[in-house]
Image: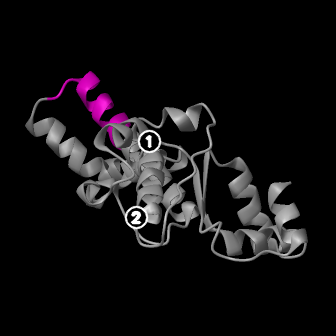
Amino acid sequence: MTNTYHDLQQKFRSLRLAETAKELPNMLRKAESQNWTYYELMDQILGHELGCREEKNRAKLMKWAEFPQYLTLDKFRLAEQSAIGEKQLNVLKELSWVEEHFALIMMGPSGVGKTHLSTGLGILAVNQGYQVSFVPMDHLVYILKTREYISKSRTRYKRMAASDLIIIDDIMYMAYEPQDAQLFFQ
């Protein structure tokens, strides 16, 4: 690698274009071998950096969502469901209900796929750039009780409050003290 490449890479790093700085020598070699115009080179450089940033943001949003498992809608067995049909699932996949701030309540016995469906919709939302929080009800009550005293709970609460979509799992599966229920509904 010549000093010229190194100097250019340093300038890219100074501009906080770290991913492009790493890939720059390969891009320049490809540009030379394929006789790219200046426009094509700039388009490739900027496109590469934007793509890397989008991927990093998506990874950050996935980490913040705290999904219990990576359950996508592709793996959801619609044929085994009686409560939801293909048309309803396609409407849910559009995610317009997230933009319109609708509450979506999934009820049914244990093991029918409520968590899988909600996780799949959450992952779809993250992939479309939404901030999502997945939290089991017992953990949510803990966060609400401790957010004033524990920094991790405070951080998690702030992320949930800033989320476009909050998925609360297993709301009906535990008995709550009256003060816990009041905290939740506030």
Relative to 36, say whether 159 is above or below: below
Asked whether residue 91 is drawn in magenta, I would say no
The amino acid type of the residue labelled 1 equals Gln
Relative to 54, say whether 34 is above or below: above
The amino acid type of the residue labelled 2 equals Gly
Residue at horizontal 39 percent and vertical 43 percent from the top:
49
Instruction: Estimate how packed mark 2 is, as few (under 14), some (14 to 19) or many (20 or more) residues with alpha carbons within 10 Å.
Output: some
The main secondary structure of the magenta stretch is helix
Picture coordinates of residue 3 (x, y %)?
33, 53
Picture coordinates of residue 2 (x, y %)?
27, 54
Q: Quadrant of the C terminus?
A: bottom right
Q: Which stretch is magenta?
A: 36-48
Closer to the camera, 149 or 122? 122
Q: Is residue 1 visible?
A: no
Q: Is residue 125 visible?
A: yes
Numbered-mark total = 2
Horizontal arrangement in the rendering, residue 46 relative to residue 172 (left or right): left
The answer for how far apart the CA atoms under marks 2 and 1 are is 22 Å
Picture coordinates of residue 98 (x, y %)?
56, 38
Residue carrying label 2: 113
Horizontal arrangement in the rendering, residue 151 relative to residue 132 (left or right): right
Residue carrying label 1: 128
Q: Nearer the viewer, mark 2 or mark 1?
A: 2
